[in-house]
Structure formats: C-alpha cells, structure tokens
Image (spheres, rainbow, N blue to C red):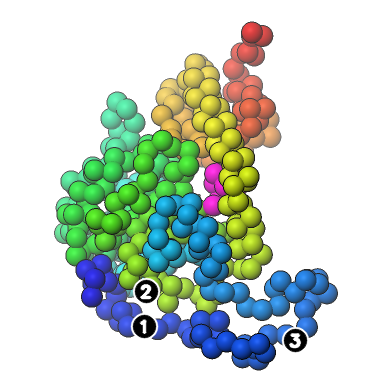
C-alpha cells in the first residue's frame, strides 16, 4: 500500500463504489444494460445525451493531463473544484473525529465541506506582514499534527488575499505531515500567477494534491469542470467515492473544445490582459483618498482596504457594480474584493470610486 493510502478512511480503502453500467467493462454493439432510452430526445436530435456518459471522459482527461503536465492516472475530473474539496473531506476524514486545517481568511468552501461532513475545523489564521498575508507554516504543521488533521487546505494564489505560496514551504509542510495528513494546494487562480504550480512537487511528495479548475481563467464556470491531481492510488480511491457519472456529456465536450490550441491561445491573451489591468487597477486604486491599502495580487482580483468599506460598497452598488464584501471575514473588516474585468468595466469601477478621469496621452 502506497503511504498516502493510509490517509484514506480505513472503512473506505477497499470500497468499490457503485458499479455503474459504464464502469463495467463489457462492450457490445447493442447495449441494453443501463435502462437508457432507445430513442434520442427531440431536444437533442444528435443523441449526444441519450447515453450515460463515461465517468471520466477519456478525451477530457487526456486534454487536462496535457494542460497540467501530469500523467492521466493522477487526474480525477469532477464538477468543479468544489466537488473535489467535498470528495477529499469525505474520503479522508471520519465524521466527528478527524480534522481539517485551513488558513483564514480563505475560500469559504473548505469550511462548508468540513461542516457538512461533521469533521472538525482547525484554523491557523494568516498573518499580515509588510508584503501582504503569509501562512505560518510551522504553526500550521504543529496545529495539524496535534489536532489530528487528515487534510490541510492551502490556497495559492490565495482567495481573497492574492498571494502565491513558496513551493519549498509547501514541500516542507508535506514532509512534516507525511503519513499524517494530505496537503491540498488549491490553484484556482494559478493561470494568473507567474509562480510555479505545486504539481512539480507531486513526484517527490505523495501526500500533496493539487486542485485546478476551468472556472476562472478558462471562462467555463458554468460548465463545472475541476480536477484533482494526486497520487495515482489516491486518485483511484477518489474516483470510486465520486457520483457515478460526475461529468455531464455537454460539459465534457465544451471543456475539450476549450482546450484546443486556438482557444488556449485566446485564453492566454485574455490572461495577459487581466495581468496588465490588475497592475493598472492596483496603481489607480491605491491613489484614491478612500483607500488605505491594496494588496499585491497574483489572481484576477484585488483585495482593497477602505477607510469606509461600507460607503465604497454602496457607491459601487449605486453605479450598478457588485463586488465581494469581505467585511465578515476575519481581519478584513474594512475590505472589498474586486474582480478584474475588461478595461472598460475597470474604468467604471474607478469612476464609481471617484478616480480622476485619465488624461489623454
Ligand atoms: C472559485 C474558486 C474555486 C471554485 O472552483 P470551481 O471549480 O468552480 O468549483 C475553488 N477554489 C478557489 C480558491 C476559488 O476561488
């Protein structure tokens, strides 16, 4: 048994999951094994949805493996990273007993999945230093070990804090937690960052898993396609714990189309625009009288502190612009998170916040 499988709930290690018609390998020209309709729907004349889909559509798995530079045996594709987070918590934590460590302020879904599964939540808050927010790695390792964590969720670049984590520190954390916990690096915003992906650590550290998604840079949030990249043995267990047909056929088809070279080239140009706009917006927003701090960001958003965040939120709302209110998050009582839009949308944000009109060059 590979070391990382010891982290899977003991009662699930030999769990086979649901044997769906599509996961059983028998094949023949006439398939009457899954109670599907013999006719396609008038709404789907091509019949692309008449059959249950392949649980892990091969064309999509291959395209994602190429995109992320990993072997397909490491990939589990599902309905967004949100499903992946839930799957990891369910597969690794015994309800009411095991714990999950997180570093708030951070993406809220980790705590939601932990709560729904009745696992215990361990919080090691980020600390603020001159350059932005930082994970206290030594304390995180200690809390995870002492608190019985099976999972540690890291977010890099962080949502909402925007900072990327150093891979050496992630590797050291995984070493410290070897045989005790899986370190999950959520890279939902990796495409907007120049920091290297934690997938580089997977060969040397079986207790690291990486989450990627097509929801942000690839503009497919509505298709719900996310990927866990993990130890191949762990990936097999996670697939067995998944819903029988986790990837709807039209979504898989759309995702494969989005990973063709011409679409990827266009996505790359959009990412370059986001980066340029992120830099422009950070400078312009920091110059506003109502702003006390703009954090450096490697994502497609900026975290901004205001002298009166409520008033800024209202001013934006009056202009028809909705941003993410962070005031309920720990240590962000005066902050808003603003997604980077098109240059024209960003100008509207600046205008609503009272920025002087840019002078003609
Ligand atoms: C948006 C976001 C996700 C959600 O991704 P889906 O693939 O759409 O479920 C995951 N993690 C973080 C940090 C996010 O901000």
Q: Which residue is mark 2?
A: 237
- Where residue 145 sits: x, y (%)? 18, 59
For the point 46% across and 58% down, the residue is 65
Quadrant containing the N terminus is bottom left
Q: Which residue is mark 3?
A: 38
Task: Indicate the secondary structure of the residue bearing disc 3.
Answer: loop
- Asked whether residue 204 is drawn in magenta, I would say no
Asked whether the viewer can see residue 339, the reply is: no
State the extent of the magenta-drawn residues as a range.
214-219
Which picture quadrant has residue 232?
A: bottom left
Q: Nearer the viewer, mark 1 or mark 3?
A: 3
For the point 51% across and 81% down, the residue is 23
Q: CA distance from mark 1 to mark 3?
A: 33 Å
Which callout, 2 or 1, points at the residue further toward the start of the chain? 1
- Where residue 308 sits: x, y (%)? 49, 27
Residue furthest right in the image: 42
For the point 60% across and 63% down, the residue is 252
Horizontal arrangement in the rendering, residue 306 relative to residue 11 (left or right): right
Q: Nearer the viewer, mark 3 or mark 2?
A: 3
């Amino acid at each position: 048994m590979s070391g990382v499988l010891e982290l899977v709930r003991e009662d699930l290690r030999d769990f086979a999951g649901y044997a769906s018609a599509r996961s059983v390998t028998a094949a023949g020209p006439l398939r009457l094994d899954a109670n599907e309709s013999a006719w396609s729907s008038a709404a789907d004349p091509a019949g692309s949805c008449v059959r249950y889909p392949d649980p892990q559509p091969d064309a999509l798995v291959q395209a994602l493996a190429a995109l992320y530079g990993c072997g397909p045996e490491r990939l589990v594709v599902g309905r967004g990273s949100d499903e992946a987070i839930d799957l990891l918590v369910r597969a690794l934590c015994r309800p009411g007993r095991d714990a999950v460590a997180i570093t708030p302020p951070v993406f809220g879904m980790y705590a939601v999945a932990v709560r729904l599964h009745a696992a215990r939540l361990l919080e090691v808050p980020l600390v603020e230093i001159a350059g932005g927010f930082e994970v206290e790695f030594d304390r995180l390792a200690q809390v995870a070990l002492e608190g019985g964590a099976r999972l540690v969720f890291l977010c890099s670049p962080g949502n909402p804090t925007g900072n990327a984590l150093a891979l050496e520190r992630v590797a050291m954390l995984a070493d410290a937690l070897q045989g005790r916990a899986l370190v999950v690096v959520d890279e939902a915003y990796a495409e907007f960052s120049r920091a290297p992906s934690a997938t580089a650590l997977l060969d040397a550290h079986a207790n690291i898993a990486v989450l990627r998604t097509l929801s942000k840079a690839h503009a497919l949030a509505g298709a719900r396609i996310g990927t866990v990249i993990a130890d191949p043995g762990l990936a097999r267990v996670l697939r067995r714990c998944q819903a029988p047909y986790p990837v709807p056929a039209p979504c898989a088809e759309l995702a494969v189309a989005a990973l063709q070279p011409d679409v990827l080239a266009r996505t790359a140009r959009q990412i370059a625009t986001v980066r340029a706009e992120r830099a422009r917006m950070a400078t312009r927003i920091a110059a506003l009288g109502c702003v006390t701090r703009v954090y450096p960001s490697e994502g497609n958003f900026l975290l901004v502190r205001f002298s009166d965040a409520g008033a800024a939120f209202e001013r934006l709302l009056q202009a028809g612009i909705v941003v993410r209110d962070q005031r309920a998050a720990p240590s962000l009582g005066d902050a808003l998170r603003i997604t980077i839009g098109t240059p024209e949308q960003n100008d509207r944000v600046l205008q609503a916040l009272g920025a002087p009109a840019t002078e003609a060059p």
